[in-house]
Amino acid sequence: MENFYWFMHNEFDIIKRKGVGFMKKKRHLFLKIFLSLILIMVLACGGYAILGKQKTLDLTIGSVDLSSIEDGVYRGRYSGFRWSNTVDVTIADHKIINITVVKGQAVAPVTTYDALEKQILEKQDLDVDTVAGATANTKAYLKAVENALKDR
C-alpha cells in the first residue's frame, strides 16, 4: 500500500507540474490571440479613418443656380467612408432657408456644420470659406448640399 501512495504522490506531482506548464502555454496563447485582435482592430480603425480622405479633399464643389429650383426639401448625400453624410436642404422663394444634417459624418464636430450652414445661408452660395482644420469635413458637407440641389 505504501508503494501505491508513493506512486500516486509522484503522479500527482507530475500532473501538477504539467498543469502549470500547460496553463502558462494556454495563457501565452490567449495573450497572443488577444493582442492580435487588438492589432487588427487598430489597423481597421486606422484604415477607416484615412480611406476616402484624398478623394474627399480632391472634390470640386460646383455652383448651384437657385433660380431654377422650386420650393421644397431636397436630400443630398456624399459617400466617402468616414466623410459620408446626408443632408436635407430646404428651398423657399429660390433661397436656401435651412440645411439639416440627417446623417452626419463619423467624427465631424457639429460646430463645423453650424459654421458652414451659416455661411451658405448668408451667401446663398456654396462658394464659402473652409472651416479651419476641417477641410475634408467641409468639402464632404458642401458636396452633399450640392448633390441635394443638383440631383433633385
Image (spheres, grey):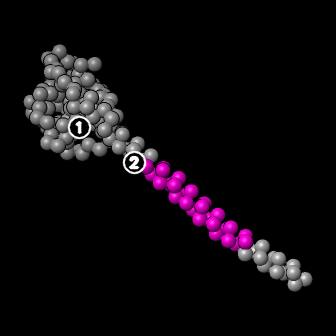
In the image, what residue occupies the spot 17% across and 31% down? 97
**Which residue lies under the disc numbered 2?**
42
In the image, what residue occupies the spot 28% across and 19% down? 151
The foreground one among 133 and 142 is 133
Is residue 26 located in the magenta-colored stretch of the structure?
Answer: yes
For mark 2, does the 10 Å Cα neighbourhood hold few (<14), some (14 to 19), or many (20 or more) residues? Answer: few
**Which residue lies under the disc numbered 1?**
137
Where residue 75 appears, as percent x and y from the top left, is: 30, 27
Where residue 10 appears, as percent x and y from the top left, is: 77, 76
Q: Which residues are magenta?
A: 14-39
Secondary structure beneath dot 1 equals helix
- Point out the image quarter for the C terminus: top left
Q: Residue furthest right?
A: 1
**Which picture quadrant has residue 23?**
bottom right
Secondary structure beneath dot 2 equals helix
Number of numbered callouts drawn = 2
